[in-house]
Image (cartoon, rainbow, N blue to C red):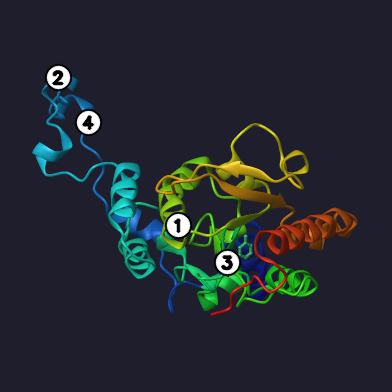
Amino acid sequence: MDLRTALTAALRLHLEWGADEALAETPIDHLATLAAVPPAAPSRSRPPSPSPATTPPAAASGALPPPAARAASLAAACRSLDELRAALAAFDGCGLSETATHLVFNDGNPESGLMLIGEAPGAEEDRIGKPFVGPSGQLLDRMLASIGLTRDHYLITNLIPWRPPGNRSPTDAEVSLCLPFLHRQIALVGPRHLLLLGGLAAKALLGGGGGITRLRGTWREVDIPGLAAPLPVLATYHPAYLLRSPGAKRAAWADLISLRRRLDMATGPQALSSE
Ligand code: URA
């Protein structure tokens, strides 16, 4: 095999593994770094590990609390969306922030009364730093325009604010780690209605074992920490799913009609604030 063919094959293999972004100007040879680490001493010579009874508590030892506890207390301390964005940008407890190019926080109008929640940024969103700007975002924009909504009429965000490498699905651990930040964002925005895009957002906020096909299309109420009253929530298919399965667009259209009716009922056809 000539060099060019070998390099092309190696590149293709990396793409298949999900490594589809260049994160630095020059490649980093992690195997070389590993080789430089001295081999671990044989276990006989290692100092005995402290028994659980003698392990100092994190606070006493100066160690940071676990990431989930830090996420919850950082999020709870935020008093504005700007503070929340800054807290997320400084949070180093989620490995996704290390591989993402940008934090993707939100876009649109926080005063509008309507909040949309997707899954996690894709490649375009990661590059630009805004949610739903890639192919599924463009489909979503067209769908919402068909019921008279532009980004002035809603705030859009994601369950996870950093792109998972290779667009893999976020893990349950990543979802639980990011959930306090999302709850806090909803509480700070105080929307009158939520639209959940896709099964992951629906499962994270509505709970239960059902998939999106069962959860979509019915208005439910959800308790969000920090909000006095339960929030009306509708789940629908994710636009990325609609791109792959155009047959589901009919159901998604029914969901959008239901959303439009609900918004009109709540405050009248002029209701959507774009200030
Ligand atoms: N898919 C999502 O769920 N969110 C985005 O921001 C883009 C694609």
Q: Is residue 22 above or below residue 59?
A: below
Q: Is mark 2 within 8 Å of ligand 1?
A: no
Q: Residues within 10 Å of mark 3 (few under 14, many from 20)?
A: many
Instruction: Tell me which numbered mark, 1 or 4, is placed earlier along the sequence.
Output: 4
The answer to whether the beta carbon of the residue marked 1 is less than 8 Å from any atom of ligand 1 is: no
- Find numbered disc 1 in the image and state the secondary structure of the residue it sits on: helix
- Residue 156 - label: 3
Distance (Cα) linking label 2 and label 4: 25 Å
Q: CA distance from mark 1 to mark 3?
A: 20 Å
The numbered dot on residue 53 is 2
Q: Where residue 2 sits: x, y (%)?
A: 67, 72
Instruction: Identify residue for label 1.
Output: 96
Which of these two is toward me, 142 or 15? Answer: 142
Tag 1 and tag 4, C-beta contact below 8 Å: no
For badge 1, the amino acid type reads: Leu
Vertical position of residue 224 compared to residue 12: above or below: above
* Among the two numbered marks 2 and 4 on one chain, the one whose residue lies closer to the N terminus: 4
Specify whether 173 is left or right of 121: left
* Residue marked by disc 4: 42
Give percent across and percent down for residue 257.
81, 60
Kind of residue sitting beneath label 4: Pro
Q: Secondary structure at mark 3?
A: strand
**Where is residue 210 shown, x and y percent of the image?**
70, 34
